[in-house]
Image: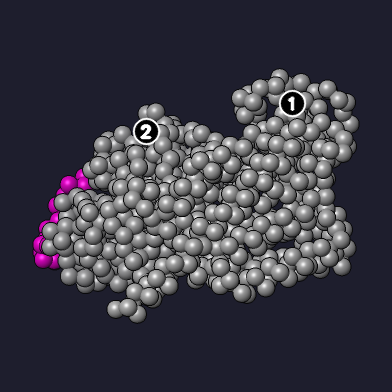
Amino acid sequence: MTTRRVFLAGLLSASATPRLTWADAGSPSLLAAAKEPSGTFALFGLADDGSEVFRIPLPDRGHAACAHPTAPEAVGFARRPGNFAVVINCANGDVVKQLDAPAGRHFYGHGTFVENGAYLCTTENDYERGIGVIGIWSRAHNYRRIGEISSGGIGPHEICTMPDDQTLVVANGGLKTHPDHGREILNLDDMKSNISYLTRDGKLIDQIELHEDFRKNSIRHMDVHTDGLVAFGMQWQGDETETPPLVGTHQIGKDATLFDTPFAQLRQMKNYIGSVAFSGDGQHIGATSPRGDKVQIYDTHLGFQNMLHRSDACGIATDSAGFKITDGGGGVYTCDGGDLIAKKRHALAWDNHLVSCKRS
Amino acid sequence: MRKILSILLVVASPVFAGVDKGLDVTLELYQRFDDTAKSLAQSECRGDEIIENYHRAYDAWNGASIVSFGPLEQQGGALVLSFWPDKKGFTAKALSQLIADQDEAIYAPDEFASVSIAAHGFLALDMMLFDQRFNQFEQDSYSCQLVRRITQDIADKAMKMNVAWINDFAQTVRGAGEPNNTTYFTKEEAAQAYLTSLSGAFEFIETSRLARPLGTLERPRPKRAEAWRSARALPNINATITALDHMIRALGDDATPETNETMGALLRFIPTIDDPAFANITDMGTRFQVESLQTMVHSANEAMSVELGTHLGVNMGFNALDGD
């Protein structure tokens, strides 16, 4: 069914844009937004050793980015509630297109490509109706918005592409907000978070909610391994003295697994996960807790393994050796599950997310 | 060249000297907590002595708790010694349950560790020693044994943290920025840990210890004050502010004049509030005083964040402050 569509889209995109590859952008391994010492913001491409490959200014503070699978294009998203997303040609720094959220919508800071990069899917808030939507943008039509589908819940945050390159997985954090009230949560008493698996045309394939006890656990960040296992991290919106689990995994058609963390370590996470990633071999999951200055490592089968100290660490991405990690002090680190190894230190404050773009 | 070098030295030195002096204060705070907690654990379960030692140890705990990173964090954070705010009344429930069951878990430290943290620490003692529903017990009763276990547990934790600071974590902080120090890759990161921790202590006073009993003008909530049974709502704040003042002066090396002035004003103002439990917060005069205290605490935190941050060359965590 999709084969023909992909084929056509591929033809169109091939004819519409020069065939640049990530090599033309210096083959960055990673993308991350940062605040610069002058107070300005930019999107950076980083090499494996943490050094800068490119720097492209952003109009305002960024949150996350996503990389096209083959062409050297990245989409940088504004932090929530954001009205901009910019598609950047990472080979020459040009802004290919500024995406504007349609009237009544704002971006949530994350997006992903599907179908070999033919479509960009963005998490958005339909704030008058208070429901989550996924905006669909066609790359072949210079990133024209071609439609939107329900996100399957309220407050969709991170969105990832499943290994079939078609199915979307969305973390619906469950928090209703309205831009007139900043980040104020308008539905704390009856919030419900879920993970939804969707097709691009809006069919709900699977959906999980957590047990009632963890209803106030907002599922916000995810990563997907090549075998389809989804790792997710949560942010607890309930009583601060409670210690719910904060990291789990899910596979389509099964129940979610929530990882136990020893009490003393769990307290140090401050009920808050900033980002999650699988290790290169898929054996481990790394989860950052910037409010507790900690990074936790879980084994997908054995659960909690290790807690590392890192001031203001938030960005984490898959790396062949394990993980790459960035912090608010400008550091870039690798981690094989043991101690962190400092690779580079920039005069920057790395923002919330670090994105791996080693695909082509 | 000489000029550039001297500028570099001036820029680089405050953070080194400041962190070292801050560390000395930290070690004093944890030593005092260890000492006073030992005396508390050696007290009889009833009588004047335990009350006196409770207040001393609680003061010392408030001082030590301003340094929330390192050993305290490794214990599970402040909650393990001070379970508050307790919005759902877990402490009363956990203690009642233990007593009703005559649960033998209290006779072994390892087993007590698995009992709800709401039955540990100073707020559990606040209830066992000052609440009429709990404090009518005899010498050698189960409740008496429970009090002994709670005080012993506090002393064990205090000692563990003090030993961890002396034997291990002091070196981690002093050696911040040295090769192989994977906790603090730079000296500034250790300074940032202090700044974040101190700011958190101010914020806790403002947004929990004061905001909760203040409630709203129409509905003040005196029973939401911290440790109101033992009339420690204000003494806890006083002990914390005293320690913060001491610490800021050590880290700031006289470069924080506005903060010092605000802290001085705070320390003079607190004794003028004649309501240690915030029981009279329903009274407009008292309410006004407590609100003023809240404003001053907020100002002190702001002044410290700017002055101490500038002096040490660090900011509060970029991602910690503003995540999503």
Q: Is residue A64 above or below residue A199?
A: below
Horizontal side of B6 relative to A45 (left or right) equals: right
Residue type, numbered disc 2: Asp
Q: Which residue is mark 1?
A: B98
Residue type, numbered disc 1: Leu
Which residue sits at x=34%, y=47%?
A: B180
Nearer-the-camera pick, B67 or B162: B162
The quadrant holding residue A295 is: top left
| Residue A194 in sight | yes
Of all chains, the one bearing label 2 is A
On whether residue A2 falls in the magenta region, the answer is: yes
Disc 2: CA contacts within 10 A as few (<14), some (14-19) or many (>=20)? some
> What span is colored magenta in the figure?
A1-21
Question: In the rendered image, which quarter contains the N terminus of chain B?
Answer: bottom left
Q: Which residue is mark 2?
A: A299
Which residue sits at x=67%, y=73%?
A: B261
Horizontal side of A116 relative to B304 (left or right) equals: left
Q: Is residue B107 above or below residue B126?
A: above
Nearer-the-camera pick, A247 or A198: A247
Dominant secondary-structure state across the stretch colored magenta: helix
On whether residue A177 falls in the magenta region, the answer is: no
The local secondary structure at tag 2 comes to strand
Q: How is the image coloured?
A: one colour
